[in-house]
């Protein structure tokens, strides 16, 4: 494997600036305790923290501030852990959208207007040089807890950088379908949180066969405060979610401490899909690697390589015990290996990605999802 530099970060987090319960200082402290390298805050439809809190290095944590854009809704409360509860007042001529179509943006100074169509948000973010990801694309809500489904519906859009392949809130909602499951999901999330939505993985595989489309993981943290039998309790506190669905970026050079250039490189890696998603509940997988060696050199995740250059896919894990590497081509399983390394000489064009599952509590649990390497 070639030398590279890996940084672990949390994406998609809400604070008191929207419907989260944590202040920035509380959230930053939780990120530090989890030994994260970067944190991308995404409050609903506001960039107020950009001015009030400011981006930058906070000790060893790179703090970035984006937003989660959502359409204006007509008279409907969006009663969800993963959505802003407030409903914007409609101005004349405003476009009214259905619940859903949430878009994560970063690297911009202005939130795209909520009364515009999603394609307009995407175009505005691109024009400003920012990045944008479709959030929780196949969120189903939860009828037991009365969470509104917030899927992405505007699939005719173009120009987004990627999609949130694994969203903690969507995963938890899918699991918590009755009282005992909801309680287990709150108190023992480790063995309850399912992997990415199968529909989202299928959509991602479909998209990456046509165009580059980065996959990221998001925690969608709100740290909702409730009272159980009169005792204050926090559902999914920041410190717990910051050790769950983590996005690891891979850079060719280390970050330098210069905020402007470091921010550009972190956002650039996310845009290119030079990253993988890992659930730290099943181990902190530093030094997971997936790359293609070929006649012209080495290509990493999110990259493209020519079949004529005889690519060989190489996967390595920090350890092999209880882990299974799954190589997929165009969304279909090609090879499974319970080893620490896997090599595969590519003989067909296609889009190749890796999943790693770990055996825990008698079942294979979702652990790592790589971005793909396209062989053209
Ligand atoms: Zn959210
Ligand atoms: Zn959302």
Image: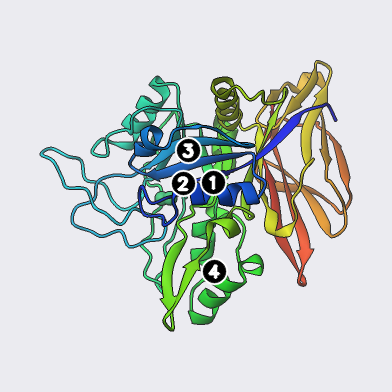
Mark-to-mark CA distance, 1 and 4: 29 Å
Using the numbered discs, state the Cα–Cα distance from disc 3 to disc 4 in whole angstroms: 24 Å
Local crowd at mark 3 within 10 Å, few (<14), some, or many (≥20)?
many
> For the point 62% across and 46% down, which residue is it?
32
Mark 1 residue's CB less than 8 Å from ligand 1: no
Whichever of callouts 3 and 1 sits on the residue coming sooner in the sequence is 1
Residue 248 at what x, y percent from top left?
66, 40
| Horizontal arrangement in the rendering, residue 277 relative to residue 179 (left or right) | right
In the displayed image of the protein, which residue is found farthest to the left? 92
Q: State how far apart marks 3 and 1 are (Cα).
A: 23 Å
SS assignment at label 1? helix
Q: Residue at x 35, y 50 (%)?
A: 18
Quadrant (top left, top right, bottom left, bottom right) of the N terminus: top right
Residue ID for mark 2: 24
Is there a contact, CB below 8 Å, between mark 2 and mark 1? yes
Q: Earlier in the sequence, mark 2 or mark 3?
A: 2
Residue at numbered disc 1? 28
Q: Is residue 58 left or right of residue 363?
A: left
Q: Earlier in the sequence, mark 3 or mark 4?
A: 3
Image coordinates for residue 229, horizontal then vertical, percent:
44, 84
Residue 258 drawn at (x, y percent): 60, 21
Which residue carries the number 4 mark?
A: 175
User: Which disc number belongs to residue 133?
Assistant: 3
Between disc 2 and disc 3, the foreground one is: 2
C-alpha distance separating marks 2 and 1:
6 Å
Residue at far bottom of view: 229
Q: CA distance from mark 2 to mark 4?
A: 29 Å
Q: Local crowd at mark 4 within 10 Å, few (<14), some, or many (≥20)? A: some
Q: Which sits earlier in the primary sequence, circle 1 or circle 4? A: 1
Q: Secondary structure at mark 4?
A: helix
């Amino acid at each position: 494997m070639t030398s590279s530099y890996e940084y672990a970060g949390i994406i998609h987090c809400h604070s008191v600036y929207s419907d989260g319960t944590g202040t920035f200082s509380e959230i930053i402290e939780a990120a530090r305790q989890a030994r994260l390298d970067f944190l991308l805050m995404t409050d609903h439809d506001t960039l107020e923290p950009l001015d009030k809190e400011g981006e930058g290095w906070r000790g060893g944590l790179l703090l970035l501030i984006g937003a989660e854009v959502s359409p204006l809704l007509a008279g409907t409360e969006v009663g969800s852990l993963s959505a802003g509860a407030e409903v914007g007042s409609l101005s004349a001529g405003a476009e009214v959208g259905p619940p859903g179509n949430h878009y994560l943006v970063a690297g911009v100074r202005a939130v795209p207007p909520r009364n515009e169509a999603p394609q307009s948000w995407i175009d505005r973010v691109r024009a400003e040089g920012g990045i944008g990801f479709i959030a929780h694309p196949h969120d189903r809500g939860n009828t037991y807890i009365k969470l509104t489904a917030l899927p992405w519906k505007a699939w005719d859009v173009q120009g987004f950088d990627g999609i949130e392949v694994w969203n903690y809130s969507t995963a938890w909602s899918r699991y918590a379908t009755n009282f005992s499951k909801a309680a287990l999901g709150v108190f023992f999330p480790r063995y309850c949180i399912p992997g990415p939505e199968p529909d989202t993985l299928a959509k991602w595989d479909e998209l990456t066969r046509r165009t580059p489309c980065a996959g990221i993981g998001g925690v969608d943290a709100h740290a909702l405060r409730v009272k159980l039998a009169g005792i204050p309790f926090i559902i999914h506190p920041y410190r717990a979610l910051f050790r769950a669905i983590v996005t690891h970026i891979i850079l060719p050079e280390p970050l330098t401490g210069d905020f402007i250039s470091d921010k550009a490189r972190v956002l650039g890696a996310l845009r290119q899909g030079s990253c993988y998603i890992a659930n730290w509940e099943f181990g902190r997988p530093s030094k997971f690697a997936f790359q293609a060696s070929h006649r012209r050199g080495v290509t990493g995740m999110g990259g493209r390589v020519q079949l004529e250059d005889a690519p060989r896919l190489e996967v390595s894990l920090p350890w092999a015990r209880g882990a299974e590497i799954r190589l997929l081509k165009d969304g279909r399983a090609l090879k499974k290996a319970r080893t620490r390394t896997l090599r595969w000489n590519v003989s067909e064009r296609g889009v190749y990605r890796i999943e790693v599952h770990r055996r825990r509590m008698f079942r294979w649990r979702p652990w790592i999802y790589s971005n793909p390497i396209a062989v053209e």
